[in-house]
Amino acid sequence: MSLALGAEAPPFDLPGVDGSNHALSDYSEFPALAVVWSCNHCPYVQAWEGRMKQIQADYADRGFRLVAINSNDSQAYPEDSFEAMRERAQAQGFNFDYLQDEDQSIAGAYGPERTPEVFLFDGDRRLVYHGAIDDSREERAVTAHYLRDAIDAVLAGRAPGVADTMPVGCTIKWRS
Amino acid sequence: MYSCRIATLSGVDVEFLYWRGCPSHPEARQLLEEVLKGTAEIREREVETQAEAEALHFPGSPTIRVNGADVDPAGAEGRPSLSCRIYHLPDGRVSPVPSREMLEAALQ
């Protein structure tokens, strides 16, 4: 079951493709934090990756950070191995941290079902928005910018007008 | 277990393989029907296990073959797996479904 709105962000401390570990507490200075379940092999993720980068770039100076976590079983899906993650982050020029949750324990704590799937937390690290980045994998067809609107609300000290949407994407590849 | 619907008209064999775990197959199926315009029926197979994916050389969902040839040959040799298939569109975008142009070219 997915983390409930208002719930506190479960802690994590995971290896990133930059060679360092990154913990939830490392982001404490940022009043808005998006934890996005992601991966390498999913076409839905790849369709949204550019928007993930753009959102990080647009809000970087306003106290926002995006962190992507890949929890997929890399034994069954070698495209999602840590080495492949490093290669993709470099090739795509990721401007956000990309972490591996190899034992899937963090996914178990947050409860994502899809990639990409967003959990946006406020400065108290309470969940204020959960779901999709926006309403279309086709960027030119987007009419509702859920994550951007939610970030704007958090940074303005308001609750997002839309707090929960249905993520569309690949399933999390759990270990059998 | 496969769910099959019976096959070919006009001498064209159109095979539509999908995995229920990827949400792209209804959109791809609709696009295929639009391109076919009723000129051929679709042989549909649901792939449910990794063993089936390997036996069918299924590189992801959906996979569409016309007379045995993949509509996107570049992706046909991908590792068999229960996953969403990546299609690279001519304009550089990535999509979980093939383009209309890919389907039309495969059916010519």
Image (spheres, rainbow, N blue to C red):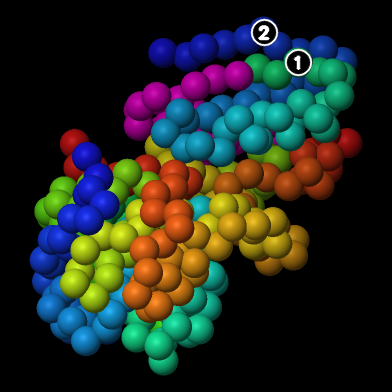
**Mark linked to residue B41:** 1
**Looking at the image, is mark 1 or mark 2 earlier in the sequence?**
2
Q: Residue at x 56, y 38 (%)?
A: B24
The magenta region covers B44-69
Which residue is outermost to the front? Answer: A158
Establish if B2 lies above or below B91.
above
Q: Can the viewer see residue A25? A: yes
The secondary structure type at the circle numbered 2 is loop
Residue B65 lies in the magenta-colored region: yes
Establish if B93 lies above or below A151.
above
**Mark linked to residue B6:** 2
The reply to whether callout 1 and callout 2 are in contact (CB within 8 Å) is: yes
Which residue is outermost to the bottom? Answer: A61
* A129 and B89: which is toward the camera: A129
For the residues beneath circles 1 and 2, the answer to whether they share a chain is yes
Residue B24 lies in the magenta-colored region: no
* A9 and B48: which is toward the camera: A9
* A160 and A144: which is toward the camera: A160
Left or right of B23: which side holds B67? right
Q: Residue at x 68, y 66 (%)?
A: B92
How far from the left and from the top, in percent, is residue A38?
36, 60
